[in-house]
């Protein structure tokens, strides 16, 4: 009798089993991380299904109030935020939760055996929801410093300290991108079985692509270096793509290459993007895929945060494309 061969195609792996097998490679791992990721995937499935039924359930549109960052809150911002808080709030190992939608962080536990803090933007790009444009959840995981005093200061760590980061993109398919510091893996939700399946390991961002992503309507309010970069790009055959959901724009750049920019403007000298909830996690993903991320001329992940909701200028994407922007910033006053 001859041995049977595996059926055609590669092994099928879910996000949960992938994380479990990664954890088993670390001696002494407690499994806490897997529990947290299971909460993230559950949140993603709930939020994804809410978005798909939003028009039917009449949960589109604004609720008429503003969040901690001063943005108009959508009904689905609140639903996504509550879903994440409910899924993560009871997980072992989580000390602190911080959301772009909440003024203050939530202190879950103060015991020493709570090793993680989780920060998230529940629904990035939510102002586009009424038009059925892709939106996403962005998250960042940090080690908790149980000696931090007051305890909330444990959250104020630079992006270089992130243990893991990722996003769930609710687009034509529901994608889960994650890094734990050794490359980026991509999973897609198979709605027929309710599981995120691994579709690509160790994603690499294209080294160059003649494409930029910026709200060019604000051009006259950008510092001179950004305006000169845009002139240079116009003269060099670049095309422009701007979805207006950073998570979707950055995902497109991860797959197809290019550069995402949200510069300072005369009205907002620090730009619009939130450092802790949007810029840091997406920068970790981009860098882990071989790209670069800067805040002006400073490496983005090295910024020491001073406040939870602080904003930062952003340049991230393919290494060659980020370099072109930096060259123009370096030669401008
Ligand atoms: P949000 O978190 O309130 O949705 O705001 C952030 C979003 C980003 O996703 C996007 O890149 C940016 O705002 C778009 O801003 P603008 O309309 O100024 O171009
Ligand atoms: Mg956002």
Image (cartoon, grey):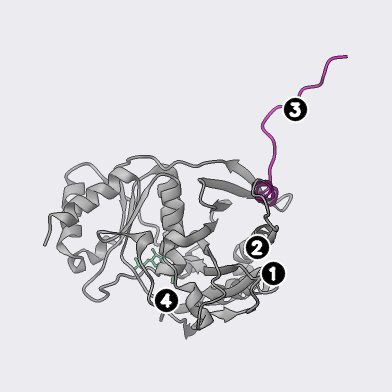
Give residue 109's position: percent from left, percent from top. Answer: 64, 78
**Please, is residue 10 above or below residue 172 in the view?**
above
Which residue matches tag 3? 7
34, 251: nearer the viewer: 34
* First-in-chain label (3 vs 1): 3
Which residue matches tag 4? 309
Residue 68, disc: none
What kind of element bears circle 1? loop
The residue sitting at 25% across, 59% down in the picture is: 297
Q: Taking 15 as reference, is 291 left or right?
A: left
CB contact under 8 Å: marks 1 and 2: yes
| Residue 331 is a magenta residue | no
CB contact under 8 Å: marks 4 and 2: no
Residue 91, disc: 1
* First-in-chain label (4 vs 2): 2
| Residue 22 is a magenta residue | yes
Give residue 321's position: percent from left, percent from top. Answer: 29, 46
Is residue 245 in sight in this rendering?
no
Residue 36, disc: 2
The quadrant of the rendering that contains the N terminus is top right
158, 126: nearer the viewer: 158
**Residue 311 occupies quadrant:** bottom left
Is residue 39 in sight in this rendering?
yes
Q: Which residues, given as a range, are shown in magenta?
A: 1-24
Pointer 2 local density, CA inside 10 Å: few below 14, some 14–19, many at least 20: many
Disc 1 to disc 2, how far (Cα)?
Answer: 7 Å
What kind of element bears circle 3? loop
* First-in-chain label (2 vs 3): 3
């Amino acid at each position: 009798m001859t041995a049977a061969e595996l059926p055609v195609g590669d092994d099928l792996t879910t996000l949960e089993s992938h994380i479990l097998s990664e954890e088993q490679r670390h001696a002494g791992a407690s499994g806490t991380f897997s529990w947290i990721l299971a909460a993230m995937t559950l949140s993603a499935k709930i939020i994804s299904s809410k978005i798909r039924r939003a028009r039917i359930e009449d949960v589109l549109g604004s609720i008429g109030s503003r969040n901690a960052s001063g943005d108009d809150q959508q009904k689905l911002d609140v639903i996504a935020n509550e879903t994440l808080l409910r899924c993560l709030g009871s997980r072992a190992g989580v000390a602190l939760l911080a959301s772009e939608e909440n003024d203050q962080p939530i202190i879950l536990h103060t015991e020493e055996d709570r090793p993680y803090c989780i920060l998230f933007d529940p629904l990035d790009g939510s102002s586009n929801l009424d038009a059925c444009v892709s939106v996403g959840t962005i998250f960042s995981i940090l080690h908790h410093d149980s000696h931090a005093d007051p305890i909330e200061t444990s959250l104020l760590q630079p992006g270089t300290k992130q243990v893991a980061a990722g996003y769930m993109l609710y687009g034509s398919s529901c994608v889960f991108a994650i890094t734990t510091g050794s490359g980026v893996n991509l999973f897609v939700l198979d709605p027929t079985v309710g599981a995120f399946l691994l579709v690509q390991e160790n994603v690499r961002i294209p080294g160059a692509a003649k494409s930029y992503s910026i709200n060019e309507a604000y051009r006259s309010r950008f510092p001179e270096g950004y305006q000169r970069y845009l002139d240079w790009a116009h003269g060099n055959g670049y095309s422009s793509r701007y979805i207006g959901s950073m998570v979707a724009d950055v995902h497109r750049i991860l797959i197809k290459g290019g550069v995402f920019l949200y510069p300072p403007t005369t009205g907002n000298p620090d730009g619009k993007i939130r450092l802790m909830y949007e810029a840091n996690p997406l920068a970790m993903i981009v860098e882990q895929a071989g790209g670069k991320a800067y805040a002006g001329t400073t490496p983005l992940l090295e910024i020491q945060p001073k406040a939870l909701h602080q904003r930062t200028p952003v340049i991230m994407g393919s290494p060659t494309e980020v370099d072109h922007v930096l060259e123009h910033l370096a030669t401008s006053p």
